Amino acid sequence: MAELVELKVDVLVSPNLPAIRAAKQATKTIPIVMVINWDPVAEGLIDSLERPDGNLTGLSRLTRDLSGKRLELLKEVVPGISRVGVLDDADVPLQTKASKDYQAAGRALKIQLQSLEIRGPNPDLEGAFQAAVKSRIGALIATQITVVIPYTEKIADLAIKNRLPLMVETGSSVAAGGLMSYAASDADLFRRAAIYVDKILKGAKPAELPVEQPTKFELVINLKTAKQIGLTIPPNVLARADRVIK
């Protein structure tokens, strides 16, 4: 970020929370457009969605807020499921762990959650899956966090190999082999981020551009993956899918 500030770029754009924090520390003048999974107010990035103040604006995916809905879908697709593993970052504080947002929903649905912590930059994914199988986990959630994102395809392959239903947090991860996702459309969000950039380049100030949240979410299901792990998607769930990969 210091290097980009030194280059005097016109706008900084990032979907990465640590990068956005670094950008905020590096500059108070260069506009920053974010597209993040977390609530930017709760994370202390901005004062309010309506008037973000400072040089930061953009979009929140509401990824963490949809945790309960994803667990509900898993329970529909995998009847009788009682244990779910959640891939998470071993190096982040407890209060910011992505798996934390699944806990309340897990209790309500009588699903026991097990955090499968991995550590970058070379996470032991095979070890995490061995732990999942040993603990008789019935399904897995791959959270959309920095340590997981580069290994989306490998995680999907390991889930198929171990016949574990894999819930992911973006539609693109379903295309990479995940079983299903429920999330805002990344393509739509980044198109909208481009509109923010356009307005800023035409003179708008980030503080005057409210932070947007998605209003439409899509259920994406990979039937090829379901077949590979021997799982039949219930017709009532399949009928609700916005996109089906065959």
Image (cartoon, rainbow, N blue to C red):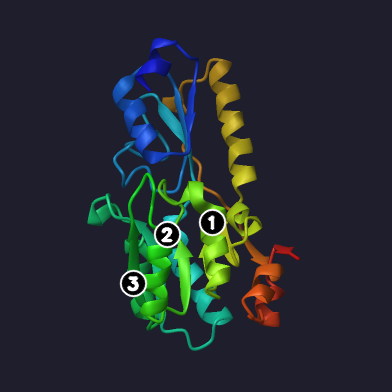
Callout 2 crowding tier (Cα within 10 Å): few <14, some 14–19, many ≥20: some
Q: Nearer the viewer, residue 64 or 204?
A: 64
Q: Is residue 149 above or below residue 165?
A: above
Helix, strand, or loop for circle 1?
helix
Callout 3 crowding tier (Cα within 10 Å): few <14, some 14–19, many ≥20: some
Helix, strand, or loop for circle 3?
strand
Q: Position of residue 39 (x, y in %)?
A: 38, 48
In front: label 3 or label 1: 1
Q: Position of residue 3 (x, y in %)?
A: 39, 16
Asked whether residue 169 is in view, the answer is no
- Amino acid of disc 3: Gln
Q: Residue 241 vs residue 99: left or right?
A: right
Callout 1 crowding tier (Cα within 10 Å): few <14, some 14–19, many ≥20: some
> Which residue, given by chain and number where applicable, does mark 2 sit on?
125
Q: Nearer the viewer, residue 99 or 36?
A: 99
* Gap between marks 3 and 1 measured at Cα: 20 Å
* Gap between marks 2 and 1 measured at Cα: 8 Å
Residue at 37% from the left image edge and 83% from the top image edge: 110
In the orientation shown, which residue stands out farthest toward the right? 246
* Label 3 vs 2, first from the N-terminus: 3
Q: Residue 195 vs residue 29: left or right?
A: right
The disc placed on residue 154 is 1
- Amino acid of disc 2: Leu
In the rendered image, which quarter contains the N terminus?
top left
> Which residue, given by chain and number where applicable, does mark 3 sit on?
114
Quadrant location of residue 199?
top right
* Label 3 vs 1, first from the N-terminus: 3
Q: Is there CB contact under 8 Å for labels 2 and 1?
A: yes
* Gap between marks 3 and 2 measured at Cα: 15 Å
Residue at 59% from the left image edge and 38% from the top image edge: 190
Q: Is residue 55 above or below residue 82?
A: above
Q: Residue 106 vs residue 185: left or right?
A: left
